[in-house]
Image (cartoon, helix red, strand yellow):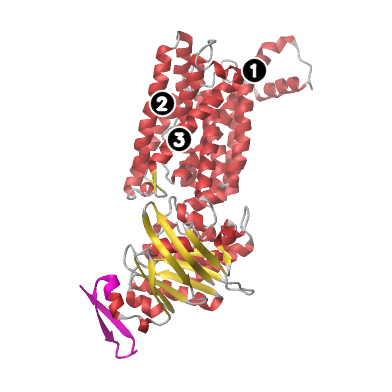
Amino acid sequence: MPRRLTSGQVQLLLGLALVAAMVASAGIGAFSFAPERMLHYLAQAAGWLPSTDADALGRNVFLRLRLPRVLLSAATGAVLGVSGALMQGLFRNPIVEPGLAGTSAGAAFGAALVFVFAGGSGSALSFTAPLGALAVPLLAFAGAFGATMLVYRVSTAFGKVNVFTLLLAGIAVNAVCGAGTGFLSYVARDPQARNITFWNLGTFTTASWRGVVLVVAVLAICLALAQRHAKALNALMLGEDEAAYLGIDPGTLIFRLLVLNTVMVAAATAMVGVIAFVGLIVPHVLRMVKSSDYTFLVPASALLGALLMVLVDIVARVIIPPAELPIGIITAVVGAPVFLAILLRQRGEGGVGFHG
Amino acid sequence: MAELRAVRYVAGNAVILDDVSARFRPGAFNVILGPNGAGKSTLLRVATGLLRPTAGTVLYDDRPVRDFSPDALARKRAVLSQHVSLAFPLPVRDVVLMGRYPHFGRAPGAHDREIVSRALDLVGMREKGEQPYPTLSGGEQQKVQLARVLAQIWNEDAPREPKYLFLDEPTSSLDVHYQLHLLDVARGLLARECTVVAILHDLNVAFHYGDAFFVMDGGRVVLETDRASEIPPALIERVFRVRTHAVVDQETGERVWRFSL
């Protein structure tokens, strides 16, 4: 995508690519569906065409398994992309993403608590029982918020973020949350432990319409709110004092961004597990091909994040059939080298990203 | 008029500003002088509304600064800091446009874009408008930041209203050319109902550009005067802990100070 394309054109291209990828993803798998078959099933689901028993199996696979999976992967990717963009703006650094700042690990720990303890009556977390299906997202949110807040507070001094402190604090918080999650999977009974392991690597196999509704709703609300803060995110690039001179209260802005972020990451993590590096790569690619302007970056990160995740999900399904590769493995294999490339580039530029 | 009334600022047990009152001369170039640690930066941060004083009031046009909404305050006064680095590369024009943020909602209007162009013209950076900010030299970056604060309190066109520009050691890292250029542009604002309040370290530059002087020491304003010639050498020697020696420039008749320990 050359630089002379306008922001709108880049977004349009991303949108078209996303639709194409979603159609492909919906068609590919153990059951494959042609686009006209998909339309047929959709029309049947809407009641426009009569449903027949003959194609009940295909229809069920498509409507109950494939479609929610495609939608969940797209929504999750969009959430992670936007979250990465916000996180980088908040910390004023291009190497930050939810995985580094402890957000994902905190969410994972919170959710693992529910997995292991919420089941039995009289257990420490039986108070979550009335929360029902919302227990996992809520505890994931609590864990994510606590971890991110801790890392942010530790790495901020006199209104400036110290990136080295940030990385070290992130390592520490990740280690503590990782140890907690590890302990839980150790004490857990077998099926729970297996859940935690799978889920620590991210998976869409458990995609349900309930998960789709939750993540899409969170995405819609948070995306709209993030867009409203695009100007303020740009101003924050100048530093907290300069942003304040432009009429933005940095304290309020940072708190709102942290909450937005943790809501998004917690929702995605609660539904599909920990998926690293998407939040890192997506905004970075967009900064390179077009602009760091947040009025562009926020919506474009949603589109590119969704596109990337749909593609990764296709790879996860087709690479070792009939088994599936956990999503987190693929994103790490692709993402870690990109991360190193960014670091090398920064070193070449005299460490541009390391200025607080 | 911008005014501080009995301002006190305490951080922990340290009294940074001790009962400071100052009335900055409207439409003039006000200079704050003083040694490191005298409280100049804190005074500026209180005067701009960034810090809330422990006691006392800051007023713009007889209205307490706390009564302004954040956007209204940002349209009333702008602040140019010593050095502003950008976390991510943006084109120069987008950086200057940030000065218009307090003026528009979601998207800038044609009026805002025109002001950005004219502000870039004023600092002589229009042809670099599309260049990424981090690729500029330190002096050019400061020109862009100056254009940004000019766009923020844009007062070139009638009807004008009183505006305030605060400069926080804006020339510290600039070479002589960029120093003089920046201060000339700032002086040019005085004719447009803008009051300038600057912290300057180079005393000769300060005496040359300033219209009113506020000498600070130990958290207090120890001297306030409209004439550089009225600042006693003994005061400079005591406050800055140097010895002074004045030389008169044969051509201009202007007094030039030399310092030694």
Q: Residues within 10 Å of mark 2 (few under 14, many from 20)?
A: many
Give the camera-side residue of A263 and B6. B6
Q: Are marks 2 and 1 on the same chain?
A: yes
Query: What separation in Å lies between label 3 and label 1 (alpha carbons)?
Result: 35 Å
Q: Is residue B258 magenta?
A: yes
Residue at 75 percent of width and 19 percent of height: A44
Numbered tag placed on residue A64 in the rendering: 1
Q: Secondary structure at mark 3?
A: helix
Which residue is identified by label 2?
A: A177
Pointer 1 chain: A
Give the camera-side residue of A286 and A170. A170
Residue at 56 percent of width and 59 percent of height: B66
Q: Amino acid at mark 2?
A: Cys
Viewer-side label of 3, 1: 3
Q: Amino acid at mark 1?
A: Arg
Which residue is identified by label 3?
A: A148
Query: What separation in Å lies between label 2 and label 1 (alpha carbons)?
Result: 34 Å
Residue at 39 percent of width and 50 percent of height: A158
Q: Indicate the position of residue A126 as horizontal and vertical percent values.
A: 54, 15
Numbered tag placed on residue A32 in the rendering: none
Query: What separation in Å lies between label 3 and label 2 (alpha carbons)?
Result: 12 Å
Q: Indicate the position of residue B202 as horizontal and vertical percent values.
A: 33, 72
Q: Amino acid at mark 3?
A: Thr
Viewer-side label of 2, 1: 2
Give the camera-side residue of A338 and A173. A173
Q: Indicate the position of residue B115 as horizontal and vertical percent values.
A: 57, 66
